[in-house]
Image (cartoon, grey):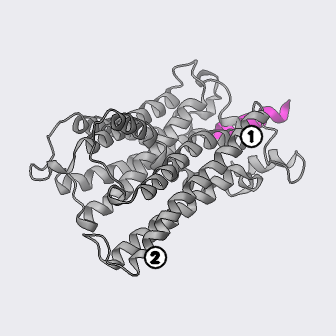
Amino acid sequence: MDRIARGTAGRGRRGSDAVASAPGVGTGWRRLRRWAGYGAALSMSCYVVVKLVWVIVALFRPAPEGFGTTGWLLLNGVTLVMAGTGIALGLALAQPWGRRLPAVPVVLFSWVGAGFLVPMLPYLALQTALAALGVGTGGGDDGADAAPGWESALISIGFAGMALGLAVGLPVYFRERWPGAFLGRLAEAPAAASPLVTSPLVTAVAVVAVVGAVGLGALWCYWGLGGTLGLDPARRAAWDLNGRLLNTSAGLWALLGAVSVAALIRGRPARIRRWVPLVLAFGASGALFAWSGWKLPMVILGPGGFVTAEYPMLAVAEHSLAIGVGLALLAAVVRGVRPAEAEGYRLRESD
């Protein structure tokens, strides 16, 4: 994929905006991608400011209840590294050099970053609407519920701005860099683009992943809507309205990922633009991997008195499965993109 992108870029003016000449990507879309990237980087810088303040304060004052100083510094150090990576990703979306970066780290970092943040946009909008109606959800983030107003505001700007920037900028970036994989409708995609054709093993893994995503999505929606099967009676209070909203959001995204990958495998609905299920499957698979990859060590280690409402062994199994399903869905997407991009490139070369 990266060789194709370099070959396409090489035909343009040296030092130009990499693959700015990609078919169907106009100046307006490229400008939108740049502003989205800069906006994401600037927004996440607000979050970095708060984290730096917390780290500095922790050097002179006791850590929040439930944390030792070392544990608190370690947690904030990890989130600072993640935030710094997010800023770099935003700049890569905005700058010409971003299209010249190696494909694998760009895809992986954007996959995890988008998986963490983009699926939270509907949840944040709903939480804001409920707050405007005077309905409290009981939610908080990283101690933000006890933080001063300016800290809470900067954290919210950081998350929401980064999520919106990735949601807008990443699809345009991918469309510019690998145009052949995004052209046309599902029914018009080259036959080689289907994982069903490339390998029976890939097909089997993709189908199993789709089934797993449906199962996880149904389970999380069941819990989000008030179901109690599989929950420890002594810990059910750990999920207030905020917890149920998060479970419902995670469940809906898992189901959306399953539907999107199934559409890519089957090539149906025929009239749907190919980029739609590609982008949705990419984001949903990243959400499965990123959030369960974060929650699994939290369940096992229980830092800061962290508790989950599920029975511990069920929580471990659930998040381990979600990590595997997320990886398998991504593999199906990438396996479907590669031959489609190659075919699209050959078609453009023959024009």
> Which residue type carries mark 2?
Ile
Horizontally, residue 33 falls left or right of residue 146, namely right
> Regarding mark 1 in the picture, which secondary structure is present there?
helix
Q: Residue 31 — which label?
A: 1
Give the mark, 1 or 2, whose residue is nearer the N terminus: 1
Instruction: Name the residue beneath numbered marker 2.
Output: 56
Q: Is residue 343 magenta?
A: yes
Residue at 68 percent of width and 30 percent of height: 183
Image marks 1 and 2: residues in contact by CB distance under 8 Å? no
The answer to whether one can see residue 60 in this image is: yes
Residue at 73 percent of width and 34 percent of height: 344
Q: Which residue ends up furthest to the left in the rendered image?
A: 233
The x and y percentages for residue 224 are: 25, 37
Q: Which residue ends up furthest to the top in the rendered image?
A: 271
The answer to whether one can see residue 301 in this image is: no
Point out the stretch of residues depicted in magenta.
339-351
Q: Residues within 10 Å of mark 2 (few under 14, many from 20)?
A: few
The x and y percentages for residue 289 are: 42, 51
Q: Which residue ends up furthest to the right in the rendered image?
A: 13
Tally the marks.
2
